[in-house]
Amino acid sequence: MVALTRLRQADLLRGIAAPAIVATILVGSLLVPLGTNASGGTLRVGAVQGNVAEPGLGAFANAFEVLQNHVSGTEQLADDVGAGNLDLVMWPENSSDFNPRVNDDARALVDEAVDAIDAPLLFGTDQYVEGGGPGGIDVRYNEMVLWMPGEGPVFAYAKQVPAAFAEYIPMRNIARIFSPAVDLVSVDMARGTEVAVVPVPVDRLDRTVQVGTIICFEVAYDALVRESVLGGAEVLMVPTNNASFGYTSESVQQLAMSRFRAVEHGRATLQISTVGVSGVIAPNGVLQQTTDLFTAEQLVADMPLRTALTISDRLGDAPVVVFTLLTLLALISGLVTAPRRVRGRRR
């Protein structure tokens, strides 16, 4: 009888311990300070959400129209804030589907926008490389290109984690059975190899600002964002193209991910989409500005630059590894002690 009582007490303690540990972690996390100060000054950023005429997959057919929309939005931005009054202008992922480094018509439009705003422009485009893949196949890269007034392209970051069935098609012959739309992706995207940081010269600060450039759903990969911050990123930009998702909640979901990353790394974050939802996020996760879905809008924000590292930056995946090991140990312990508890109850 005594043994049975002790076993019941042990079960009760275990039942209390798990919620107590979770509650302690949650309450303790509220005590961790979330810095929002601009330790490295501020970056005055303008962002353009150009919009598309046709939501969904039809947006693929409107490449020059999308580029023109972003040029027009930048010219509107110049009218609103004045030329030369921004440190950086952000366009979304795929804002120029035609690469202006090789397409003269696209280059003329990008130059038109940069001349109007008189500020560095960071925008999304593709780079095609003939025979650049395994076995000499053609590949392309999803890039964010830094275009300087009077200079043109000076730097590019290539997306490290392309999206399967969107930017490249695994098992294409099988996938085609389920949807012919897979052939809209005619050339598979290759992985970039550089850290997601773009160095942006800022005359007003008389220095180069390291801008973390997390393309689209790269924001879902905590290790990639952490690598960017450890690589010097003082602010985070999340350029994305949500046009093919139509009127779904995907863009809101992605904005929530960006808010999480802002808190996790203590960095001001800007998500800029071709069609929305776009938003400006403080380092503590507060959503300061936002846009509607499928509208043409512009954002202007003074974003605090920070270099301090958070606990998450310093610890990385270590807590996940530790808690995973503890969970496995608890499971093994339960499997080992369960037969003993059953025998004790039978007595």
Image (cartoon, rainbow, N blue to C red):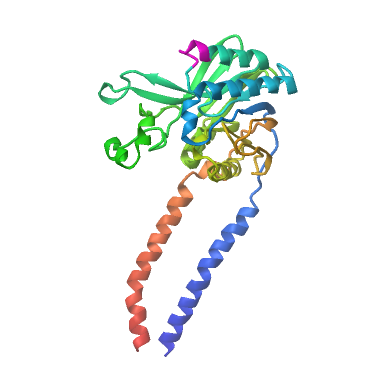
Quarter the C terminus occupies: bottom left
The stretch drawn in magenta includes residue 195: no
Q: Is residue 125 visible?
A: yes
**On screen, residue 261 above or below 54:** below
Q: Residue at x 47, y 41 (%)?
A: 221
In the image, the segment drawn in magenta is 100-106
**Quick check: 338 above or below 94?**
below
Q: Is residue 136 above or below residue 36?
A: above
Q: Is residue 102 magenta?
A: yes
Image side of residue 65 versus residue 177, left or right: right
**On the rendered structure, is 40 left or right of 326?**
right
> Most extreme residue toward the left, as rendered?
135
Q: Residue at x 48, y 51 (%)?
A: 319
User: At which x and y percent is residue 155?
Assistant: 51, 18
Would residue 195 be seen by someone viewing this image from the given angle? no
In the picture, residue 20 is in which quadrant?
Answer: bottom right
Q: Nearer the viewer, residue 111 or 271?
A: 111
User: In the depicted view, which residue is nearer to us: 281 or 61?
Assistant: 61
The quadrant where residue 187 appears: top left
- Expressed as whole percent of the image width and height from the top left, the position of residue 333 reads 37, 68
